[in-house]
Structure formats: structure tokens, C-alpha cells
Amino acid sequence: MTQDPYELLGVTRDADADTIKKAYRRLARQLHPDVNPDPATQERFKDVSRAYEILSDPQKKATYDRGGDAFGAGFAGAGAGFSFTDIMDAFFGGGAAPGGGGGQRGPRSRQRRGQDALIRIDVSLAEAAFGVTREIKVDTAVRCEACQGEGAAPGTHPVTCETCRGAGEVAQVQRSFLGEIRTLRPCAACRGFGSIIADPCRECAGDGRVRSRRALKVKIPAGVDNGTRVQLAEQGEVGPGAGPAGDLYVEIHVEPHETFTRHGNDLHTTVSLPMTAAALGTQLTLPLLEADLDSDDDSDVRTHYDLQVTPGTQSGSQQVIRGFGVPGLRGGRGDLVVTVEVDTPTRLDPRQEELLRELAALRGEETPTGQPSASSQKSVFGRLRDAFNAH
């Protein structure tokens, strides 16, 4: 078998470092003993690993290109000294970062993004429908001003870790049938940061942040409903090491209204009418949801609606008033649905009772049968209306 590292990796002599690394990854996936335990394949894997060791090292590559022996005494022995992370690269596409996740090797940053925060506020139905600006108080982590987020006591700074010399990771070497295998692990002395805070800030205990209560203004858009969350970007918790702040979410809770209930973007309300008003028809003045708004000027906002109740209106009937519901978050507006309940009198004086009995006689209703009637037949209020019209 050829001993030329270029031929072993299947690359040309002018191949760049990235091409050489890709070729090694491809071959390592095919030849690694965990994938292919055949002895001949294992020997080829050793040769490929040694070839990559030479061509990935600029000095060894230059020596070989000048005519040096690829696998002679001038180079490391079979598989000796190559990094186990190169094999990991072949299978996972990158070295293992300190802390276990994939990513760039080296010390990890003390700065990390902060967590998102959540606060709940109560608003009235009118405020939810038409929008409002509220001032809220939030208790979150903010940057420590004493150390400017560095974590070290004022006048001091983090010092380079002597164990890892600022690398944030240390190498462990093990011998195997492949030779010496070097693995990188996070430095225990500095926890992978590459530096140590010898004198932590007394205000934040080295975290770079402290808790503080502050006031914020939040604009609640028109049309929000129960459970709607308004996002305030970068107003949440500041991260460790004064890292970027997370977001603050304001969750809306709409208080019950004494007159209206909300169904989607529609408002529902119920009005009670005397039996006579339902039979004869009438006009009602209904307050609209706009009547709840605080207005200091003489604006043209309509706060009431004149509802026409037609003669013979039945209990449970509904009237839909278009465009007087809740504005939608994406435009438009719902309707106001008015349900009529007819109030039957429970107490009558003698004269009222006499008149009703007289009306029942005129209508032939002294002894009603109580039999179900077809929907096409006139209801009692329809017949009542006809009796009034006849006189």
C-alpha cells in the first residue's frame, strides 16, 4: 500500500487545509473500528490517521513536501499524538465545546443571555377593547453598576487561569491500540472560563448582576383578550456576566364587566322589558362600551345607542348592532348582540288582574290547552299584539 499521505487521503498536493480535513472526515467515517472492525480496515485507518497528522500540521507537511519520510523517525509513531477531537470532528462535524455542547473550542464566555420574565396585569374590558398605556413595576436582574458587570471587585479584574493558561480546557492523554489519544475537557479550576475572579464584587458576588425594582410603561394594543401576552424586547432578566437581557412578557387579564360579556370580538348584553313594552314595542337607550372610557375632551365618541324594540318582541329574541363590538387586533370590529328578556309580572293589583282577565276573554285564552303548537302559529305575544291592534 502507498505511504504517500496525499494518496492515502485522496487529495492533491495543492489541497488546502479545509479540503484535507474534509477528506479525513469522510475516510474516518468509513474506516473507524467502531464502524468497521475488520483488521485490514483498522490498519488502513491507522495509515489514514497518520497521513492526516502529517498534512494537518504545517511543519510536518512542509518537511514531507521537501522530501522527508512520511512515516520515518522524523515524525510521530503510528497514531501517536493525534487529537481525539479530530476523530470526533469526523463523526460530529466539530470539536466538543467546554460544557458538552458543540461549538468553537476555547474558553467560554462569562456572559450569557438572561431569562425571559412574565408579569400579569388586570385591565378593564374597555381598556382591553380600545387599548391603554400602563405603568408597571418589575423586579428583575440588572447589570451591577459597582463592577460594571465584570464580577470582580472595583479596581480588580479577572486573572488568567494558571491551570489551563486561559484556554478554558485541559488535555488528557490516554494510550490505546491507536497510540496516544488526547481528549479535551473543561478546566476544573476556572470552570472553562479561562480566567478566575480572585476578588469577587461584594454587590453581586461575582455574578455581574443584581436584582432591582424599576418602572416601565407598556402600551396595550386595542383588541387584546384574556391571556394575550405583550412582548417587551430586552426588558427581562439581564444574563450572568451582564449578558444580554431576555424579553419581558406582560400577560393580560380582563376583568368581568357588569353589563357586557365578550365572545371573540362580539359583545353580548341582555335587557329586560315589561310584558306590555314587548307587546306594544318601545325604544331603549343602551350604554355602549365607549361609555366606560375616561374622556376629558368633547370628543365625538358615541357612548349610547337608541335601540328600537318592535311590537310583539319575544323573550329570548336577539338584535345585532353591527360594528359596536370589540376592535380586532388586525382591524375591523365585532358586533353588539342584544338579547331581550320579557319580564312577566308576579304581583297584580285587583284592577290589573281584572284587565288581564278581560284581555284573556277577548282572546279566548281563559282555559289554554297547553298543547305544543307549530312554529308557524302565532305566539301569545303575537296574539296579544293583534288584540291591541283590533281596539
Image (spheres, rainbow, N blue to C red):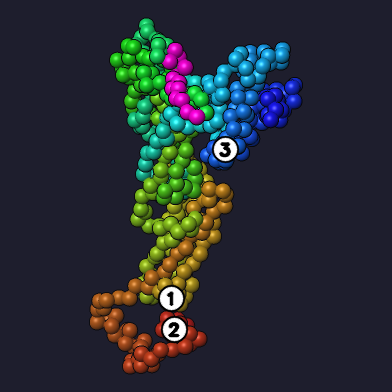
Q: Residue at x 45, y 31 (%)?
A: 100
Q: Are marks 3 and 2 in contact (CB under 8 Å)?
A: no
Magenta residues (range): 164-177
Give amino acid for label 2. Answer: Ser
Question: Can you give x and y, in whole percent of width and height, for residue 49 in the image?
Answer: 59, 27
Task: Please name whichever residue, 270 or 241, is drawn nearer the observer in this view of the structure.
Answer: 241
The residue pinned by badge 3 equals: 39
Give the vertical position of 3 relative to 220 (above or below). above
Circle 1: element type? loop
On the image, which quarter does residue 155 sit in? top left
- Answer above or below: position of 342 versus 305: below
Whether the residues at callouts 2 and 1 have beta carbons within 8 Å, the answer is yes
Return the disc, 2 or 1, that comes first in the chain's sequence. Answer: 1
Residue at image position (47%, 47%) is 224
Side of 63 where 305 appears, left or right = left
The numbered dot on residue 314 is 1
Numbered mark located on residue 221 in the image: none
Of residues 292 and 182, the one nearer the viewer is 182
Comparing marks 3 and 1, which lies closer to the viewer? Answer: 3
Q: Which label sits in the foreground, 3 or 2?
A: 3
What separation in Å lies between label 2 and label 1 (alpha carbons)? 9 Å
Task: Identify the mark nearer the N-term, 3 or 1.
Answer: 3
Examine the image and state in which quarter residue 17 appears: top right
For badge 3, the amino acid type reads Pro
State how far apart marks 3 and 1 are (Cα): 94 Å
Q: Position of residue 271 (x, y in %)?
A: 39, 65
The image shows residue 283 at horizontal and vertical percentages of 45, 66
- In this rendering, would 161 be left or right of 349? right
At label 1, which amino acid type do we have?
A: Gln
> Which numbered dot is residue 379?
2
The C terminus lies in quadrant: bottom left
